[in-house]
Amino acid sequence: MHAEICDFILDIVQNAVEAGSSRIEVFLRETERIIECRVQDNGRGMTAEELKAARDPFYTDGTKHAERSIGMGIPFLVQAAGSAGGSVDIKSEKGKGTECCFSFDRKNLDTPPLGDVPGTFLTACSLSNSLSFLHAGEFDLILNRSLTTNGREDSYAVARSELTEALDGLETAGSLSLARIYFTSLEKSLRDREK
């Protein structure tokens, strides 16, 4: 079982990578009441039948992981969000991509902790060269369809391409350490503004 909400984010990002996505956007919003995430990609997408089957823990398409006969990522997310007063909504179109939105009620005792956001984004960067990330506070993230903060001080947006350009890649321990320091400082600023 996933121990943190960030584990679900990484799982969905990995699904997007395995679906051949050349663009993955992660939107994360936190308020006093809710933790909400949207992962959007332009990968293979799914038909209505495949989307329904993805919620079944005893289904796998057999192509992503030939050695496995089950797929637990989406079913775990649906079960965890549902038991914590949250929700999961997945939209997909074959050949166009998938959008997975999920939420957790922060006040529910069954809601797992958010987890290590800087570490999650850095790990996701190792999975995809085309990742963008927005972490926001108190505004309507689901209606904000762009990865821009529009000058808001209660959010930050970063693209992997910006990091690789600024750090001359993300392949060395030094550049990864600097990227982690950068994300940690962004998270600290976001948390300080919430106080």
Image (tube, grey):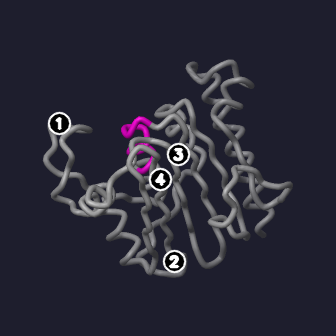
Q: Nearer the viewer, mark 2 or mark 1?
A: 1
Distance between the alpha carbons at the discs numbered 4 and 1: 23 Å
Q: Are marks 2 and 1 in contact (CB under 8 Å)?
A: no
- The residue that label 2 is drawn on is 105
The local crowd at label 2, few if under 14, some if 14 to 19, many if 20 or more residues have their Cα within 10 Å, is many
Q: Which mark is residue 66?
A: 1
The residue located at (50%, 38%) in the rendering is 123
Pointers 2 and 3 in contact (CB under 8 A)?
A: no
For the residues carrying marks 3 and 4, which lies nearer the camera in this image? Answer: 4
As displayed, is residue 82 above or below residue 186? below
Q: Amino acid at mark 1?
A: Ala
Mark 4, residue position = 9
Q: In the image, which residues are magenta?
A: 12-20
Q: Amino acid at mark 3?
A: Thr
* Amino acid type, label 4: Ile
Q: Nearer the viewer, residue 195 or 67?
A: 67
Crowding near the residue tagged with mark 3, few <14, some 14–19, many ≥20 C-alpha atoms within 10 Å: some
What is the spatial separation of the Cα atoms under label 2 and label 3, in whole angstroms? 20 Å
Rendered residue at 62%/42% (across/down): 132
Vertical placement of residue 29 versus 97, above or below: below
Residue 33 highlighted magenta (yes or no): no
Distance between the Cα atoms at labels 4 and 2?
Answer: 16 Å
Predominant SS of the magenta segment: helix
Give residue 120's mark.
3
